Amino acid sequence: MARQQRAIRTRRVFLEAAAEVFDEHGYDAATIAAILERAGLTRGALYFHFTSKEELARGVLQEAVTAEGLVPQAFKLQEWVDIALLLAYRLPREPMLSASIRLSVDPRARSLFGTRWPDWIELGAQILTEAKARGELLPHVDPQVTSRLFVGAWTGVQLIAESMAEPPDLVCEISSLFELFLPNNAVPGVLSRLDTSPHRAERLLKESREAVAS
Amino acid sequence: MARQQRAIRTRRVFLEAAAEVFDEHGYDAATIAAILERAGLTRGALYFHFTSKEELARGVLQEAVTAEGLVPQAFKLQEWVDIALLLAYRLPREPMLSASIRLSVDPRARSLFGTRWPDWIELGAQILTEAKARGELLPHVDPQVTSRLFVGAWTGVQLIAESMAEPPDLVCEISSLFELFLPNNAVPGVLSRLDTSPHRAERLLKESREAVAS
């Protein structure tokens, strides 16, 4: 393995270890020692990539806005749906994503690092603006407001799902959320052709990962 | 003032002081000393009412499910709307309510005390079930699912609003959220007669407080 490739992989191992520890214990209670133990690498290797716990947290948050699995669709609104379903499918499976939510809802970590919510809102607003230009949205829809409310709704639905003794499947919850959000946003001809089924995310992600691997 | 009335008032002063300190610093960083200082009362008085910080947190959470300001309406759906608007109006003004959200989103406090989300979901589901029996809801609506998604959406919209550099007005945000939620829940004849205006909450609360005072 070339030296540069090895460095990228090592950096990734530390970020994933940090994400797991932040996700399990929260930012304040997370220690460098616990992150090192989780990564199974040396302190020297860590400090080559990250100078502090703060920098690790920033690194985790940088990975948090992702549209992996998304492929262009006939309707922009379908892409908006797909990003949210993909994230709902991946979040319980990828500590990097759940850690970034935990860091965002923790007021102390939030005051240090901010959140990625503005980026999610911006991404959604861009897609919805394009959808509107193509005539997919009802005339009254404000892409910025709808995107902000949806990012909020998505986050809260996730938070409450994970707090329950028997958590409902997050992809099913987000799929149901779209049944509430879409009728007052999409024009009828588009609405009836959008696929919000919970199984969609797993299939999209599998296809995109197979395409990368081949 | 009768002794019992004074005891109720003292207990309330401690709960409000604790709520302010939890809200500002989080559960872990909150100290009994800071709560005493905020309350301006003695340690003896505190321990007469509460034996620990834990008990204060439980007391704060007990105050969190409130329908103050709600009055019976022609449509049950209007009552569902009113509870959510009233809470959105009161939350930024009452530390007891914002503290209970902060305690709920903090995973450590949550593991100690649970959350009041199940109670909010149950309250909403009861109202929606009654609305359905009266023919106000579309046939496909499941009161439990709609209530759960709405409590999640409300919570996340609040969380993201408060994290913004220039927070949007929470009552306006929740009012907009209803514009998204209601069309796929209410039958058309009811939908057009529901009042989701942001000004409604302030008026309802004022009227109900005047009625109590007189």
Image (cartoon, coloured by chain):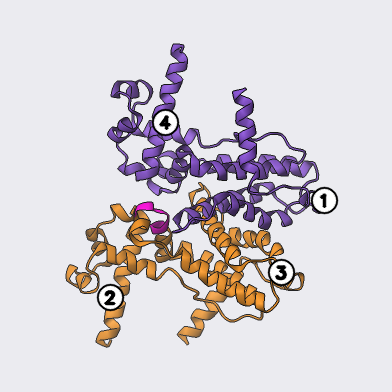
Chain colours: A orange, B purple
Chain letter belonging to callout 4: B
**Disc 4 to disc 2, how far (Cα)?**
49 Å
- Name which residue type carries label 2: Thr
Where is residue B90, by image quadrant?
Answer: top right
The reply to whether callout 4 and callout 1 are in contact (CB within 8 Å) is no
Q: Which residue is mark 2?
A: A10
Numbered mark located on residue B15 in the image: 4
Image point 32% across, 43% down: which residue?
B28
**Disc 4 to disc 1, how far (Cα)?**
44 Å
Same chain for the residues under marks 2 and 1 in the image: no
Where is residue A38, by image quadrant?
Answer: bottom left
**Disc 3 to disc 2, how far (Cα)?**
49 Å
Numbered mark located on residue B189 in the image: 1
Q: Which residue is mark 3?
A: A139
**Mark 4 or mark 1, earlier in chain:** 4
- Judged from the image, the secondary structure of the residue bearing numbered disc 1 is helix
Label 1 vs label 3, nearer the camera: 3
- Name which residue type carries label 1: Gly
- Name which residue type carries label 3: Pro
Numbered mark located on residue B10 in the image: none
- In this rendering, position of residue A203 left or right of residue B55: right
Q: Position of residue B182 (x, y in %)?
A: 70, 53
